[in-house]
Image (cartoon, grey):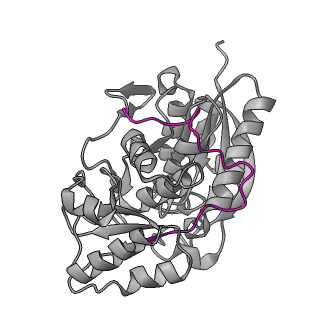
Amino acid sequence: MTALPKVAFIGTGGTLSSVGRDSLDILDYTATGERLEAEEILARVPETRAVAEVVPVRYRAVTSPGVGFSDWRALVLLCERLAREHADLAGIVIGHGTATLEETAYALSLTLTVDLPVVLVGSQRPISALSSDAGLNLVAALRTAAAPDSRGRGVLVVLNDEIQAAREVTKTSVARLQTFRTQDFGVLGQVDGPHVRYYRRPERRHAPGTPFDIRSLDALPRVDVSYAYADADGTAVRAFVQAGAQGIVSAGLAPGMTPPAEAEALGAAAAAGVAVVQSTRAGSGVVPATRRLAELGILSADNLTPQKARILLALALTVTRDPVALAEIFAAY
């Protein structure tokens, strides 16, 4: 018999690990406070044993709104340790809540040090629910992490039988199973039963080998997101500057504009030495690097969503404060 590939499964909590009141509890399941650890999730999905030799790795079972920089750093170190301890490891799967899954995926895609496929997986329905997507999503993620073709594509996100790039994917629906979408470019590939099929590659740079090393950092530079809306007057921008923000991402009106008073506040922040990046709340499309932005000292986020532009800007500020170098980073990553 052919040996199954070895895949580590790190459980960080989220809906994938949640146990509701009963099988029909698909909305208020967090009220029970019951979340399973990695080995308990695997016990609930015995089919995982048919696709991989899974190494369960305890982390901490939390809801994803509680996941942030300290977890990203810990996961980078944990993945490094797993790769060191298991020379035959084919890949790593991280179970994660869907609320911030795309942010963790992108942060890891910029900071991981291991040259292994790393796949983030979650679910829209708790593992205890009737017709839960948790089990099949986990099986698909294990298959993807074990697939040789998954190497060299950066961190991947797998739900609903679809493989997405960490940089590009975003959550688009509160409860629908097809919530994770890559608006501009579509999926990288699909998981059809035992078949992991790819149709394109991400073009932007990703880990390993980036200049962003967070393993010894206590925190990232403070970067805030200012959300634009009609009549926005810059109050939030000035508050962020007062709070010590080293960077501000503007979630602007499409195609990357803000009301005049907001633009004035952003320009003043840039003049004061705060790195300011213009994104858009539209969720799709590239913010053009216009003369207006240049005159205000504001950089383009390219097509990154505000939440991902925030991550890249914070990481970029750990290696440079030069506006030209920052612009090059946004063009590369």
Residue 127 visible somewhere in the drawing: yes
Outermost residue toward the top in this view:
1
- Magenta: predominant secondary structure element? loop
Q: Is residue 197 left or right of residue 36?
A: left
Quarter of the picture containing the N terminus is top right
Q: Residue at x 57, y 74 (%)?
A: 30
Q: Quadrant of residue 290?
A: bottom left
Closer to the camera in the image, 164 or 137? 164
Percent across and percent down for residue 152 are: 50, 26
- In magenta, the rendered stretch is 202-225
Q: Is residue 80 magenta?
A: no
Q: Is residue 216 magenta?
A: yes
Q: Residue at x 27, y 58 (%)?
A: 294
Quarter of the picture containing the C terminus is top left
Q: Quadrant of residue 17?
A: bottom right
Percent across and percent down for residue 222 are: 56, 68
Closer to the camera in the image, 76 or 91? 76
Residue 162 visible somewhere in the drawing: no
Q: Residue at x 55, y 53 (%)?
A: 315
Closer to the camera in the image, 297 or 207? 297
Percent across and percent down for residue 185 are: 26, 41
Picture layout, residue 249 above or below residue 284: below
Closer to the camera in the image, 229 or 103? 229
Picture layout, residue 207 above or below residue 24: above
Q: Is residue 35 left or right of residue 206?
A: right
Q: Residue at x 55, y 81 (%)?
A: 243
Q: Tally the numbered discs.
A: 0
Percent across and percent down for residue 81 are: 77, 38
